[in-house]
Image (cartoon, rainbow, N blue to C red):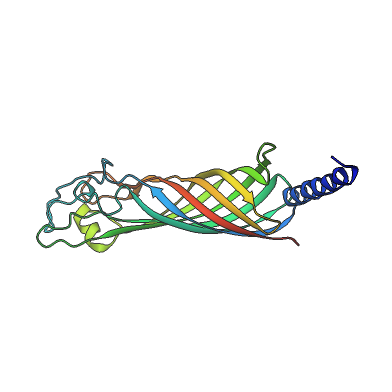
Amino acid sequence: MSFKKIILFSVVASTGFSVINAMANSQGIYIEGNAGYARQNYFSNESWDGISPSSAVGAVGTAYNNNSNVTGGFSGGVDAGYQFNQNFAIELGWFYLPSVNVMQTGSAGQTAAYLTSWALYLAGKYMMPLSWMNNTDAFFKLGAEYRTATLPTAAQTGYSTSTGNSSFVRPMFATGLDYHFNQEFLGIIQYAYFMGANNSFGSTTGAGPMGTVAANVFTLGLGYQFNV
């Protein structure tokens, strides 16, 4: 290898390492969008899988609706944060969670009734550049979620609940990888866990409350960082 080629290679390598280092140490505001699949098991949950209340709607239960998001479905979310340095950031995000048909459709007089839910979270984010994978960070998020769940009137009647609205605060966490395409754009693969609650909807019959199931969310995403 000639001396000129050695010099050229050194310059290119130095430039590449500088770009990577700049991305790893960048500060500023970022935004991200994520979409994927949320696993939340209402299908075999003991509160929701089957019940026969003494009401006009007859038997209800998710065990009869295994094709209505009762084991999971589409989920998506957005977040925005501020990265302080190479390792630490703070983030505010929101996720749509799958709507679940909790009624036994197909029976006489019954129509679908979907439990809906979403989660808002605030979390700290720790990032660790991977020395063996260029332009890639492993990350971990830990914070608090504010989650809501809404039960339509038909389901309130069928399950004999005292309310159709629930909200609660619980811990949440997420982990995954960020891949920096350049100083602005990055790709994301993430797993997030949003905790549920076992007492979301009180009972009018003394049978015990109905819960909101935890969500295990697997997503791919795209982010943009404003270097300010």
Task: Identify which residue, 128 or 168, lies in the foreground.
Answer: 128
Compared to residue 98, the image places residue 1 above or below, namely above
> As drawn, is 163 to the left or to the right of 135?
left
Is residue 96 shown to the viewer in this render? no
Question: Residue 19: x, y in percent?
Answer: 76, 51
Residue 58: image location, x then y, percent: 12, 54
Q: Residue at x 63, y 46 (%)?
A: 125
- Which residue is the extreme one toward the top? 132
Q: Residue 137: percent from the left, percent from the top?
A: 65, 44
| Residue at the left extreme, as displayed | 108
Evaluate whether residue 199 shows in this view: yes
Quadrant for the C terminus in the image:
bottom right
Given residues 9 and 31, the one toward you in this image is 9
Residue drawn at (15%, 61%), measured in percent from left and top? 110
Q: Quadrant of the N terminus?
A: top right
The outermost residue toward the front is 2
In front here: 158 or 91?
Answer: 91
In this picture, residue 144 sits left or right of residue 211: right
Q: Is residue 95 left or right of residue 23?
A: left
